[in-house]
Amino acid sequence: MQELMRHIAHSPFWMAFVGAHFIVYSVPAWAIVFVRFAKGRMGRGERVLFAMLAGALLLEAVQLFADGFSFSGDNTWGIPRYFGVFAPLLWIWAAFALSRAWCAGNGGPARIAVRCAIVVGIAWVLVFQNVSALRGFYCSGARHDAVVAARRIAPVIQADYKGPARQAVRKTTLAEYCSTRRPVVFGDFSAAAWMVRGQSEGALQGKGLCPYEDDYLFIRVGSGYGGQNVIDSRKYDYVCSVRGGLGTEWRLFRRKRVLVDVFGPRN
């Protein structure tokens, strides 16, 4: 499956219709769909279900086309997020095949062997394709490093921040989902903003898509942030440093604010 996924990962078309739907389930499900369609075994309800799935996939593809995305290249970024939400509709055919296999035969050793194989297969998918993958995702690598650092810096931000809990003016953007919550904390994986229940910059870090200025900038030393490797001391004050889950150093910077004299300019 991993070898197949490597080939699919370079094709927007195959990623949209196979890879985005969890390949362990999607490959047998599509095979069953085509076999049942070719043999004319689809009932009315099944045809309605397939029409719903096909319509949803088509509408998503049209939306991406309208946004200028091309399925002819090798750019597959974001496709699993967009097309994967329809996966449960496709998995119904995989579940149908498992149910038929579970009840196949007239009992005896053959049925027991089939059921044992199904249980082992589901256990393998659960442990090695889900639990192990999630453990690696959250307990090692760059994300783990960022999450641990964010957890350690959150109390510092909460104690340091003296501003309002909400933005004074609500702004919108078509590119990101933004709230009015503060503090606004920019940093890898948006982890620090999440820990303090504030506002992050969104998925495209360093692209200026968040409509608000950051209150804090939380960066990993050595890798920079959004193309920034040098922090402008005219805009930010250094607050403190913490260590991430991999032992790397992270630094917190507070944006400087221009204080306005409410009494006007002084002579």
Image: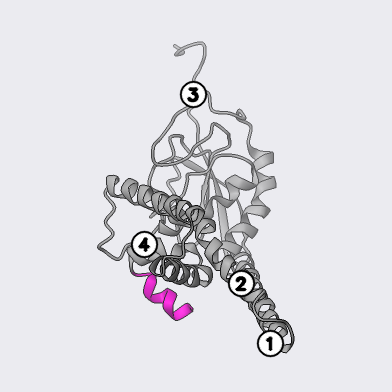
**With respect to residue 138, does 105 lie above or below?**
below
- The residue at the point 58 percent across, 59 percent down is 146
Q: Which residue is mark 1?
A: 110
Amino acid at the residue labelled 3: Val
**With respect to residue 204, does 7 lie above or below?**
below
Near mark 2 (Cα within 10 A), the count class, few <14, some 14-19 or many ≥20, is few
Q: Of label 2 and label 3, which has the lower sequence position?
A: 2
* Helix, strand or loop status at disc 3: loop
Foreground disc of the pair 3, 1: 1
Q: Position of residue 200 (x, y in %)?
A: 52, 43
Foreground disc of the pair 2, 4: 2
Q: Which residue is mark 2?
A: 100
Q: Which residue is mark 3?
A: 169
Say which quadrant the C terminus sits in. top left
Residues marked 1 and 2 touching at CB (< 8 Å): no
Q: CA distance from mark 2 to mark 3?
A: 58 Å
Residues marked 2 and 4 touching at CB (< 8 Å): no
Q: Which residue is mark 4?
A: 76
Q: Of label 3 and label 1, which has the lower sequence position?
A: 1
Q: CA distance from mark 2 to mark 4?
A: 35 Å
* Helix, strand or loop status at disc 1: helix
Amino acid at the residue labelled 2: Arg
The residue lying toward the viewer, choosing from 250 and 105, is 105
Residue 92 appears in the figure: yes
Magenta residues (range): 1-10
Q: Position of residue 172 (x, y in %)?
A: 43, 31
**With respect to residue 144, does 63 lie above or below?**
above
Q: CA distance from mark 1 to mark 2?
A: 14 Å
Residue 204 appears in the figure: no
Amino acid at the residue labelled 1: Ala
Magenta stretch secondary structure, dominant: helix
